[in-house]
Image (cartoon, rainbow, N blue to C red):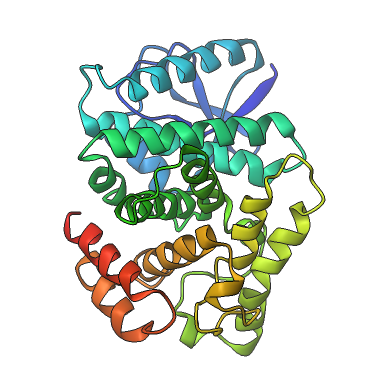
Amino acid sequence: MDYVSIRVSTLRGDQKIDFNAYVKINDKMILYLRRGDSFEGERLQRLKDKKLRKMYILTEEENTYRNYLQKNIEMAYDNSSNKDIQTRAEIIQGSQQSNTEEVFENPDNVESYNYCKDAAGKYVNFILSNAQATQTIMNMENTDKNIAHHGVTVSTLSIALAQKLGITDSRKTQLLTLGALLHDYGHHGSPLNLNQPLDKMSPEDKKMWNQHPHDGAQKVHDKKHFDQTVINIIAQHEETINGAGPKGMREKEMDPLSVIVSSANAMDRLITFEGVPKTEAAKKLMIDHVGKHPLQHLQMLNDILRGV
């Protein structure tokens, strides 16, 4: 039998699957979830705990799987849906993470990039039109320190920050979100252990970390389907307004949307990779990063996290 891989991040919610899902163990396909069951609760948590990112389905059931995805996503984005915000947010978060992973793995694929871009615009609308959306997404712990999950969290903070800054142009918020999703492309496939404080990194690790924005931007700078704003965000998201970033850029030299992502990224780095509790992250950012990010951003991020 022939199998095709599917992303675990797309398997969310209480919708029953109409295909069989397998895990690969020692080159053998083991049935994990039968047709008619769902991935809610402990089943999904076990996969997360094992840091399993891909499962398998029979090739002949690929269209059935895609129909399952489409139904799930359409329901989740429907504000008139009778599903609770937790279920909807889990599906949408998983979809955004999957879209990001797809671009990371296939940056040459124009269709994957455009799909991710279109979904970024929908994500902005979801966050802005559902009062509990930001809180719900932010409370989904990134247990396996996945950089695509981190991208979704940074995009969520970026949207919330842009809203407080009064940025309403839909194209700007779409590209802001897309850039935030893809900002850590330079870490894709890297051996660097991100799960450590920056000031505790070895010289070798710090050199690798300093290089990742440049590496990510270099990999996509010649791809005509990538928007320049997105490339700017990938290249500049570790820059700081006082010139302390890898390239020494200051605020006036940075893309304004990169400044937003830089602030949001610094916040989630503390939470996701340095283990700082959300209740303390804003205060730590204000103390340790003073002068590196606009004070207004830090105050607004503090307000955003206070509501989480």
Q: Position of residue 167 (x, y in %)?
A: 40, 49
Residue at x-position 38% and y-position 82%: 289
Residue 244 picture quarter: bottom right
Locate residue 225 relative to residue 72 in the image: left or right.
right
**Viewer-proximal residue among 138 and 156:** 156
Location of the C terminus by quadrant is: bottom left
Residue 151's place in the image compared with 298, above or below, is above
Indicate left or right for 142 with 194 as reference: left
Q: Position of residue 143 (x, y in %)?
A: 38, 55
**Residue 239 can be seen in this image:** no
Quarter containing the N terminus: top right
Labels in figure, total? 0
Residue at point 62%, 82% (across, down)? 248
Residue at position x 24%, y 66% from top? 302
Q: Is residue 286 left or right of residue 269?
A: left
* Occupied quadrant, residue 221: bottom right
- Across and down, in percent, residue 85 comes to 23, 31
* Vertical relation: 187 (above or below) 71: below
Q: Residue 16 is drawn in which quadrant?
A: top left
Q: In the image, is 97 to the left or to the right of 60?
A: left
Q: Position of residue 138 (x, y in %)?
A: 30, 51
Residue placed furthest toward the right: 222
Residue 156: in sight, yes or no? yes
